[in-house]
Amino acid sequence: DAGVIQSPRHEVTEMGQEVTLRCKLISGHNSLFWYRQTMMRGLELLIYFNNNVPIDDSGMPEDRFSAKMPNASFSTLKIQPSEPRDSAVYFCASSLGTGVTEAFFGQGTRLTVV
Amino acid sequence: DAKTTQPPSMDCAEGRAANLPCNHSTISGNEYVYWYRQIHSQGPQYIIHGLKNNETNEMASLIITEDRKSSTLILPHATLRDTAVYYCIVRGRGSDYKLSFGAGTTVTVRA
């Protein structure tokens, strides 16, 4: 397996534009985590899913952010409208189940909103 | 609310063992200790986890005290490629299986 795949790797967009980040889970995994990383706040958990169902979205900063799992192997994180303070590296991670398992992270998407 | 406490940084000589401490005095009986690391510009990488017994794998060893209030990650022969931020995480199972990262320890391996 190629691991967790995120796209794009880099995104530069203008303030106010819609941004969609994508994540492909490892085959067979059924838990998905979206994180955001900045120098100021470190790694923050935004939302996590289990079996395509959002379990906890308390880390989502505001209504401009939304995440979906249209199928068991794919997820999107959308920001609409984007703002400069959304600039960060966004990671997704997948794992098998909710038990004692390791989570595998993608290489991240570096988002810059100008 | 932070569940773990780690020193912000530490240096280590190449080829020597690196011992990374972590305090988790409020850990509950069904929570595990996980270690991840993040090499610059990459996604976090799983290292090891344990409940109460010491664990060893090809990357590292994890020593958990008998009262489980602290643990030590041991990199037996540190190399320059081990320079990274190391995160100690307490994680439950079931509905409390969130993987929440703190500030971690920045480990710099010097030649």
Image (cartoon, rainbow, N blue to C red):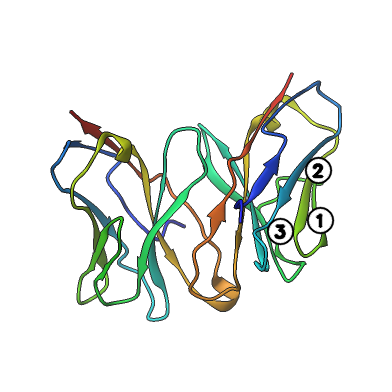
Kind of residue at badge 2: Lys
- Between marks 1 and 2, how big is the CA–CA gap? 9 Å
Residue for badge 1: A68
Residue at 24% in and 61% down: B61
Q: Position of residue B11 (x, y in %)?
A: 20, 35
Q: Are marks 1 and 2 in contact (CB under 8 Å)?
A: yes
For badge 1, the amino acid type reads: Lys
Query: Which residue: 36% across, 58% down?
Result: B4
Residue tagged by mark 2?
Answer: A78
Q: Chain of mark 2?
A: A
Instruction: Give the residue drawn at x 65%, y 66%.
Output: A29
- The picture quadrant where one finds residue A113 is top right
Q: Nearer the viewer, residue A28 or A78?
A: A28
In the image, is B41 to the left or to the right of A5? left
Q: Chain of mark 3?
A: A
Q: Is residue A39 left or right of residue A14?
A: left
Q: Nearer the viewer, mark 1 or mark 3?
A: 1
Task: Identify the residue under disc 3.
Answer: A57
Check disc 2 and report its element: helix, strand or loop: strand
Q: Position of residue B38 (x, y in %)?
A: 43, 43
> Where's residue B101, x and y in %?
47, 52
- Residue B57 placement (x, y as % from top left): 30, 63
**Quadrant the N terminus of chain A occupies:** bottom right
**CB contact under 8 Å: marks 1 and 3:** no
Using the numbered discs, state the Cα–Cα distance from disc 3 to disc 2 in whole angstroms. 14 Å
Q: Quadrant of the C terminus of chain A?
A: top right
